[in-house]
Image (cartoon, rainbow, N blue to C red):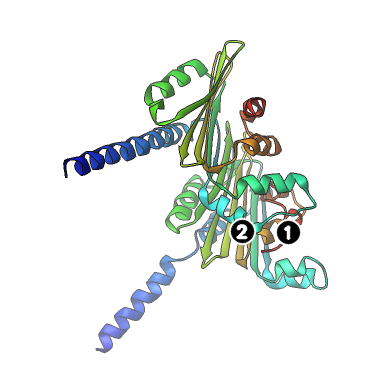
Amino acid sequence: MRTIIFMMLAIASLQSCAQSNTINSFFDAVPESDDIFKLELSGFFLKMATSNTEEGNITKGIKSVRIIGSDNLSLLPNTAVKRLSNGLRSESFEPLAEIRDGKDKIEFLIKENKEVITDFVAKIQDNDGGFLLIAIEGAFSFDDIDGLDLDFEGSDYLKKVPEEKKFPRA
Amino acid sequence: MKYLLSFLVVGILSISTGFAQTDAIVKFFDKYMDDDRFTMVYVTPRMFQMLDRLGADNEDPNGDVIMQVAKDLRGLRILTTKENPVAFYKEFDTKFNKSAYEPLMLVRDKGSDVKFLIEETGDYVRELVMLVGGAEEFVMLSFVGNIDLNKVSKLSKQLSLPGGEHLEKLEDKN
């Protein structure tokens, strides 16, 4: 009996490992480099930074914001980029929209749990070899994503999500 | 009993044909969606469902138009290319059996054909297909949902959809 319990605990822990976030793996696989921009903001930091501001309502549901960007996709391990795409599919990320013009490509994907978005991913690749990944984790609604006014290179792509100001919160 | 069987057979055939037509568009789209020669736009039903939940700001007439149209849409696929447009147009034309669709309008202008076809269910336009074929470009556009033809061209203008300028011809018709 004890053996069975231990086996089930082992399987459950393996399952947790198996559910390790594809995004986590990608961030770990990307090397440190002056030509690779990495930003990781915790939910706690966001709440602190936006307390007593309008954005405070938006950030309260966000657990983390992670961004990786580079002007040169070849700096990122090719296997990691492929595993990212495959991993997002296997983790049941749902595509929202995909727009491609030649080698310029933008993808928006989400993962939901009972109509609450738990993960939002924007993947951008451009014709000049640039790459940007934005991953937002937490518990938030669709219009919260656009309400995040992060000022960094490539943040304009988030504006392609419908603007919060145009739509009242559901 | 004989009549019932006949109706069943006709019904199954028509449903199969309908699915085959939508399937032809999806197959063609899936074949070329990763092809660098094409500009591709794909908006999933999920995205439109989420837009539907957001609602509209009445103070912004532009946002209101977008939301009014988008809330009833359930999918958007666009493929457009300027490379070998005639060949792609012919390829799609041979695979696409137009009998399941009702032609809405044909415009021939400067050597380019612009065709609008719709699939109706009762009083609703369930799918709008636009095909552009000529020496300059090939465009395949498919809107799926509960479509208001009067507003769909406004939507494409607001969103600057590739090939969307041809949708303005729908306004001329109306």
Let me know if marks 2 and 1 both belong to one chain: no
Residue nearer the viewer, A62 or A116: A116
Q: Position of residue B41 (x, y in %)?
A: 56, 37
**Numbered tag placed on residue A147 in the rendering:** 1
Q: Position of residue B143 (x, y in %)?
A: 53, 38
Quadrant that contains the N terminus of chain B = top left
**Numbered tag placed on residue B53 in the rendering:** 2
Q: Secondary structure at mark 1?
A: helix
Q: Amino acid at mark 1?
A: Gly
| Above or below for B26 versus A11 | above
**Numbered tag placed on residue A71 in the rendering:** none
Residue nearer the viewer, A157 or B52: B52
C-alpha gap between disc 2 and disc 1:
16 Å
**Farthest residue in the right direction?**
A52
Between marks 2 and 1 in the image, the one whose residue lies nearer the viewer = 2
Tell me the subunit letter for badge 2.
B
Specify whether A76 is left or right of A33. left
Specify whether B76 is left or right of A151. left
What residue do we see at 63% from left, 53% from top? A68
Q: Amino acid at mark 2?
A: Arg
Label 1 crowd (10 A; few <14 / some 14-19 / many >=20): many
